[in-house]
């Protein structure tokens, strides 16, 4: 079963790891640390600790002296630390850290890439390398036949590759034989071949999580953004001090398109309160807006922020019981919005909330740099302005707030909720998109009775669905923040069937059409494809299907709505109990829509595409512009996050295991665009196989890139392709063998030929050639 | 035997509209006393049924030195004609022989039906030369060291002969006559009919 190739974006892959001095963000025994994409490395005076998520391997040097630790090779990246209300901006970062004289005449030097750490022993002339004794505290160490070390530490496997030793003599690098030796107690020493003791010797092992590839992200990298210059922003909220569930730290890293780390941003509560990052929006100039929920008082706000102080989040200034109740609820979480400058320092930040629990689920940037935020609030005193509807004491009220570009005030803020404040009613807003005119499009869900939720079409038209279908229903709404009151709601419609439905990712397609993705448990969820469309209308598979719905401009009808169900369930897994797991959606430069969703359970089929049984945690759909024909993109075994595309429309997704580049799970069918000329099938009396030469060329002026597949459809029983590259899974027909093709020349440039061998137990070697596009699975 | 041979020749000519008929000359110089073999194949690639009949073998400065063997669909004899059909895959007929001089030659006729249906390509008739069980090299562009190739396609058959090292060559031309004179086709028909009648009268007496 093909799985996404865990490919990092090149910007991240090329960037070396960078170190920063511990200024309080880590435990006191850490002098320098590096938070790379694949691991975190902490260096103290007595060795080092390498971490991946909540697991670690402690590297110590037995018999070593406490070392002086210094940093070398300053890099251009800066570290911005906001800790416990203190700001330390533009802290220098370095490419290497040195522990001096761990043994007489021997230093340890640390550096690395985004994927794995490296450390060298630098042995000065006449120093004795036999004194080096390495220990992984509490770990089982095994010497592998290839000379590497397999370290089982804290329930996680690490690999230390065979050491490479060398000396530079007369301008040349001369290798020196080096091997590990492991004692019965796990202590590791080095065995060296002959070398010049009057010249400095370098011994270079490499330490990485075992089987580490680009997917081994230490940074829980679910929130990503790519700006128009192809700079990549990677962030999440995570903690390395204790366990994954302690969300005291929120991080962001920016990698330039050239592969340079630009900055690391780090905000941390010093009293173990949490930051929960939920959304990113990047501006064309590289400034970044972050939105989420926090119960920390340490959000780095300025005094002129809209809500600079969590404890002063709005309560009615009336000395009565309502105020007391409001004060008592100060400890609840508030939403927050934070803006970073292109260089990574905080430009402004604000809380967004009131006395009770509030949270921001999505942020988007509008004209003039205004920040649009949506979420839910339990606070009837949630700040509103020019509102269509005030907030109430409902269990949850969906809200939309438009902040000024400098975060000092709000220009518009409203709730959108059922009219009755009953505990059985609620509304939540999950996602917001903004068009060039500043109109806001909001997706969410609502539980309400008939006539309780505001619905209307634009310009007096009837909305697509006025009444609830049953259970929770999804809603789509459009607001004009420049208007006030009733006029500020342009349209609002329900979308749903008889069971629970939700739309939680929204985007505008190339034509300005609003499209949203979500989940439905309704077998009668409304579906629609345009007359004459070749896109099949999928049936509900259940018990929960992924839904994609696009609405007409006046919200009175559907433009497209289809279901993508898996065999068992597509219920999302919650990474943190307080977070509703959701889908993400974006539009690429070619107008295609990309949807990511987490899945749990056994993934055996998605409508129209049958795959082998696996257990994924993320699946990605790519909907072609216009036709909305869907390609199933790769899936990964981690919980998925934001999907973002670069300027070449290449999709990347943030996951709990790092950023992944997505590839087509089901290859495009190129059969109609490739000319295939089959040669005769001839029996080779020497090899006892049947051989055939096949000539292929593209039928269009452009070549077909290497990696396309020649699929042998309809081979009779008993006839097999001797050297297939694989077998099809979701490409028609399922199970047929295929071979990988080289570049197929364009029409005028001749043919590429491949030789295929078959074995036959009697039947004719005959098949229908089909061509699958390159990339990923098939 | 002679009558039978005349009848066989007539049958070949009469069936020319539905089969390709051609003569093959195999020159094998400088392989005296080597154990060689002719390996014929009819490879099945489509639904159309085809048959290859190889007959009128003449060995010059060479002789058969083993039994005719078949793999897959095949029947017949060297003397009476070797028939390969595409009921299986592969379909092979192997004739071992040994040159006795440096200028050995083998000739034979091939009658190959031309039935073709799609999809894909048609059946294929070819021949390898083995030396002690190993195929001799040829300049066959297929890379399979064939010395004779005849693909059955929508446009019929165009047989081709190839060359090898040490002067080995295979050429394709008109079918060879049976050993003896070669009358005109119409005469052959009349002669054959007359002979058949004469033979039947004789048997009745």
Image (cartoon, helix red, strand yellow):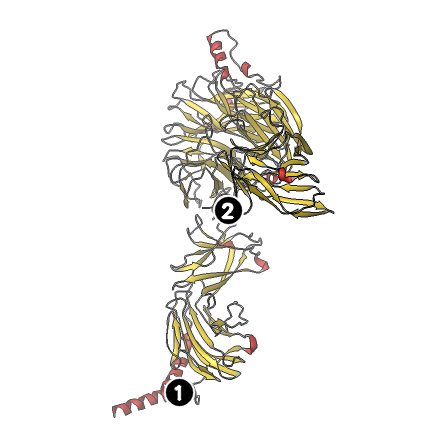
Left or right: where A392 falls relative to A385: left
Where residue B55 appears, x then y in whole percent? 41, 80
Q: Chain of mark 2?
A: A
Q: Residues within 10 Å of mark 2 (few under 14, many from 20)?
A: some
Quarter of the image holding residue A271? top right
Where residue A443 appears, x then y in whole percent? 47, 29
Seen as rendered, the residue at the extreme right is A170
Q: Is residue A548 above or below residue A451?
A: below
Q: Which residue is mark 2?
A: A776
Tell us which disc is closer to us: 1 or 2: 2
The local secondary structure at tag 1 comes to helix
C-alpha span from label 1 to label 2: 68 Å
Task: Name the foreground residue: A532 vs A241.
Answer: A241
Q: Is residue B25 above or below residue A494?
A: below
Q: Decide: marks 1, 2 in contact (CB < 8 A)?
A: no
Q: Which residue is mark 1?
A: B188
Q: Residues within 10 Å of mark 1 (few under 14, many from 20)?
A: some
Seen as rendered, the residue at the extreme top is A319
Q: Residue at x 56, y 52 (%)?
A: A705
Where residue A408 appears, x then y in whole percent? 60, 19
The local secondary structure at tag 2 comes to loop
Q: Is residue A23 above or below residue B176?
A: above
Query: On residue A298, which mark appears?
Result: none
């Amino acid at each position: 079963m093909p799985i996404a190739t865990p490919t990092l974006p090149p910007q991240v892959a090329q960037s070396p790891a960078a170190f920063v001095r511990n200024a309080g963000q880590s435990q006191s025994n850490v002098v320098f640390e590096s938070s790379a994409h694949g691991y975190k490395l902490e260096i103290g005076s007595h060795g080092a600790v390498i971490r991946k998520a909540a697991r670690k391997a402690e590297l110590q040097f037995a018999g070593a002296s406490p070392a002086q630790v210094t940093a070398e090779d300053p890099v251009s990246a800066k570290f911005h630390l906001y800790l416990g209300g203190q700001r330390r901006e533009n802290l220098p970062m370095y490419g290497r850290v040195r522990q001096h004289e761990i043994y007489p005449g021997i230093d340890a030097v640390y550096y690395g890439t985004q994927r794995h750490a490296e450390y060298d022993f630098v042995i000065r002339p006449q120093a004795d390398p036999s004194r080096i004794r390495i220990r992984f505290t509490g770990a089982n160490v095994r010497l592998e036949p290839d000379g590497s070390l397999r370290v089982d530490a804290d329930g996680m496997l690490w690999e230390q590759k065979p050491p490479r030793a060398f000396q530079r003599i007369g301008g040349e690098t001369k290798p020196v034989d080096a091997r590990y030796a492991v004692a019965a107690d796990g202590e590791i020493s080095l065995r060296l071949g002959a070398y010049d003791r009057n010249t400095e010797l370098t011994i270079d092992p490499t330490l990485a999580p075992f089987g580490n590839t680009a997917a081994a992200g230490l940074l829980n990298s679910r929130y990503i953004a790519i700006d128009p210059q192809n700079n990549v922003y990677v962030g999440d909220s995570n903690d390395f001090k204790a366990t994954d569930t302690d969300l005291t730290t929120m991080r962001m890293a920016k990698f330039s398109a050239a592969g340079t780390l630009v900055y690391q941003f780090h905000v941390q509560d010093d009293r173990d309160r949490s930051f929960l990052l939920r959304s990113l929006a990047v501006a064309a100039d590289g400034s970044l807006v972050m939105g989420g929920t926090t119960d920390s008082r340490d959000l780095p706000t300025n005094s002129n922020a809209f809500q600079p102080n969590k404890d002063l989040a709005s309560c009615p200034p009336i000395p009565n019981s309502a105020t007391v109740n409001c004060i008592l609820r100060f400890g609840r979480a508030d939403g927050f919005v934070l803006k970073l400058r292109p260089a990574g320092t905080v430009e402004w930040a604000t809380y967004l909330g009131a006395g009770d629990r509030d949270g921001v689920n999505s942020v988007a940037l509008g004209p003039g740099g205004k920040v649009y935020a949506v979420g839910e609030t339990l606070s009837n005193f949630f700040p509103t302005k020019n509102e269509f509807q005030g907030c109430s004491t409902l269990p949850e009220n969906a809200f939309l707030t438009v902040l000024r570009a400098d975060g000092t005030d709000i220009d518009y803020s409203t709730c959108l909720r059922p009219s009755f404040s009953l505990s059985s009613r609620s509304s939540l807003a999950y996602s917001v998109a903004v068009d060039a005119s500043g109109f806001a499009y909001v997706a969410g869900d609502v539980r309400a009775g008939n006539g309780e939720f505001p619905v209307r079409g634009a310009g007096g038209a009837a909305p697509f669905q006025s009444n609830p279908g049953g259970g929770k229903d999804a809603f789509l709404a459009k607001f004009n923040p420049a208007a006030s009151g009733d006029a500020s709601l342009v349209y609002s419609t329900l979308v749903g069937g008889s069971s629970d439905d939700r739309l939680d990712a929204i985007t505008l397609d190339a034509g300005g059409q609003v499209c949203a993705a979500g989940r439905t448990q309704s077998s009668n969820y409304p579906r629609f494809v345009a007359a004459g469309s070749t896109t099949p209308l999928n049936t509900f598979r259940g018990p929960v299907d992924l839904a994609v719905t696009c609405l007409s401009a006046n919200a009175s009808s559907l433009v497209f709505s289809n279901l993508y169900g898996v065999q068992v369930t597509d219920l999302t897994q919650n990474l943190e109990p307080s977070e509703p797991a959701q889908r993400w959606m974006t539009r690429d430069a070619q107008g295609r829509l990309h949807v990511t969703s987490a899945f749990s359970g056994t993934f055996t089929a998605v409508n129209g595409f049958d795959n082998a049984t696996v257990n994924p945690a993320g699946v990605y759909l790519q909907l072609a512009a216009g036709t909305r024909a869907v390609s199933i993109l790769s899936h990964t075994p981690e919980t998925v996050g934001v999907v973002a595309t670069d300027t070449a429309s290449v999709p990347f997704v943030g996951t709990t295991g790092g950023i992944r580049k997505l590839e087509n799970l089901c290859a495009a069918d190129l059969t109609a665009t490739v000319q295939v000329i089959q040669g005769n099938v001839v029996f080779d009396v020497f090899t006892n196989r049947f051989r055939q030469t096949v000539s292929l060329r593209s039928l269009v002026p452009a070549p077909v890139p290497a990696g396309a597949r020649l699929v042998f459809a309809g081979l009779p029983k008993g006839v097999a392709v001797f050297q297939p590259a694989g077998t099809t899974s979701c490409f028609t027909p399922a199970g047929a063998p295929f071979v990988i093709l080289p570049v197929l020349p364009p029409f005028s440039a001749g043919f590429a030929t491949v030789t295929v061998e078959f074995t036959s137990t009697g039947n004719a070697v005959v098949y229908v050639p089909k061509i699958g596009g390159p990339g990923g699975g098939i | 035997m002679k009558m039978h041979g005349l009848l066989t020749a007539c049958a070949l000519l009469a069936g020319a509209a539905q089969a390709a008929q051609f003569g093959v000359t195999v020159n094998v110089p400088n392989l005296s006393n080597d154990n060689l073999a002719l390996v014929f194949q009819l490879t099945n690639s489509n639904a159309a049924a085809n048959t290859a009949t190889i007959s009128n073998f003449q060995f010059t400065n060479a002789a058969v030195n083993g039994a005719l063997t078949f793999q897959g669909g095949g029947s017949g004899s060297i003397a009476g004609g070797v028939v390969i059909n595409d009921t299986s895959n592969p379909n092979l007929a192997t004739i071992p022989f040994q040159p006795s001089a440096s200028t050995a030659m083998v000739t034979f006729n091939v009658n190959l039906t031309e039935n073709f249906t799609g999809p894909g390509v048609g059946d294929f008739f070819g021949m390898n030369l083995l030396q002690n069980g190993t195929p001799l090299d040829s300049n066959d562009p297929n890379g399979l060291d064939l010395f004779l190739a005849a693909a059955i396609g929508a446009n019929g058959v165009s047989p081709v002969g190839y060359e090898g090292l040490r002067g080995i060559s295979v050429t394709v031309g008109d079918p060879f006559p049976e050993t003896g004179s070669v009358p005109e086709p119409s005469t052959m028909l009349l002669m054959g009919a007359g002979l058949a009648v004469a033979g039947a009268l004789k048997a009745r007496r």
